[in-house]
Image (cartoon, rainbow, N blue to C red):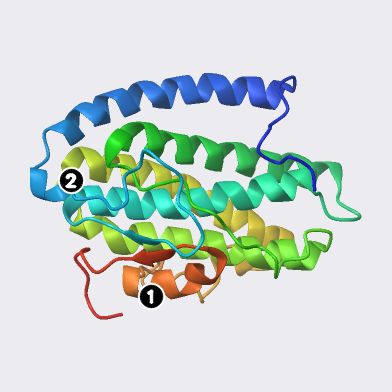
Amino acid sequence: MKNVNKLPETTPILADSRRSFLRVASVAAVTGGLLTACSTADMQVQPSGARAAAPGDVVTLPGGDIGILNYAYVLEQLEARFYEMVVANFYEGITQMERQLLTDLRNHEVIHREFFKAALGGAAVPQLTFDFSGINFRQRTDVLTAAKVFEDTGVGAYNGAGKYLQSADFLTLAGKIVSVEARHSSIIREMQYMNQTAFAGEDIVDPNGLHLAFEPSAVLPKVQPFIRETIDARNLLTRAA
C-alpha cells in the first residue's frame, strides 16, 4: 500500500494548504493560550497526547470544553485519514473535477485535524489508528457512501456538541469549522445524487430549515467501527440521544 501519510509537496493545492495552515496555526496559538486558562479538572486526558494510541487502547475524553474539543479532534482525525486514503487511491473512473473536489476536502480536513492538534497541545488525545477495511477505495459508490456518513455525522456532531461549550471563543471557532463541514456534506451528496435535492435532503435538514444535531452518544456508535481504539466519552456533558 502506498504511504498515504506523505502528502505530495509540489502541487499548488498543497502549497495553498500550507499557507492556510499557517493562518490557522496562528489561531491555534491563541487558542492554546485559552486552554492554559482552563481549570485543572478539564485537563485529565488519558492517555497523554504525547504518544500515539494503539489498537485496543481506551481513549478517555475529559470533561468540559477540553473534552468537547478533543471529541471534535477525534472526528477530524477520522475524516482527514479517510480522505488521505481516498486521494492516495482514487477510485476507478474518477473525473478530473471529482479529483479536485476530493483533494480539496482532504486538504480542509488535514487543516482541521492539525488545528485541533496544535490548539490542544499536551491536552490532546493521541493520534488514533483507523480501520477502513470495509471500504473499497477503488469503488466510487463505496467512497461516496462512506464520505456521506462521515460528513453528515460530523456536521450533526458539531451542532449537537456546540451547546456544551462554555467558551464563546471556542464556540465561534466550532461554528466556522462546521460551516465548512456542511459544504463538504452538500458536495458529497451532490456527487452521489447529482441534480437532485439531496444536497439539503430531509434526512439532514429538519422542517425548520435546520441541520440535524446529534449527541455524542449517537455519533460515537456510528464512527467507532472505524476506530481501532475505544473512545470513552463518559465525561462529556450529554443528553439522551
Density class for disc 2 (Cα within 10 Å; few <14, some 14-19, many ≥20) is: many
In the foreground, 127 or 170: 127
Please identify the quadrant where the C terminus is shown: bottom left
Please state if 60 lies on the left or on the right of 201 as rendered.
Answer: left
* Residue at horizontal 25 percent and vertical 45 percent from the top: 171
In the foreground, 58 or 95: 58
Density class for disc 1 (Cα within 10 Å; few <14, some 14-19, many ≥20) is: some
Please state if 239 lies on the left or on the right of 227 as rendered.
Answer: left
**Quarter where residue 173 is shown:** top left
**In the image, residue 43 lies at what x, y percent?**
18, 45
What amino acid type should be assigned to the residue bearing mark 2?
Met
Please state if 88 lies on the left or on the right of 186 as rendered.
Answer: right
Kind of element beneath mark 2: helix
Q: Note whether residue 195 is visible.
A: no
* Residue at horizontal 35 percent and vertical 48 percent from the top: 125
What amino acid type should be assigned to the residue bearing mark 1?
Ala
Residue 158 against residue 133 in the figure, above or below? above
**In the image, residue 146 lies at what x, y percent?**
64, 65
Mark drawn on residue 43:
2
Please state if 236 lies on the left or on the right of 227 as rendered.
Answer: left
Mark drawn on residue 156:
none
Q: Which residue is mark 1?
A: 218
Closer to the camera: disc 1 or disc 2?
Answer: 2
In the foreground, 165 or 60: 60
Q: Note whether residue 49 is visible.
A: yes
Disc 1/disc 2 C-alpha distance (Å): 25 Å
**In the image, residue 6 lies at what x, y percent?**
68, 32
**In the image, residue 208 lies at what x, y percent?**
36, 71
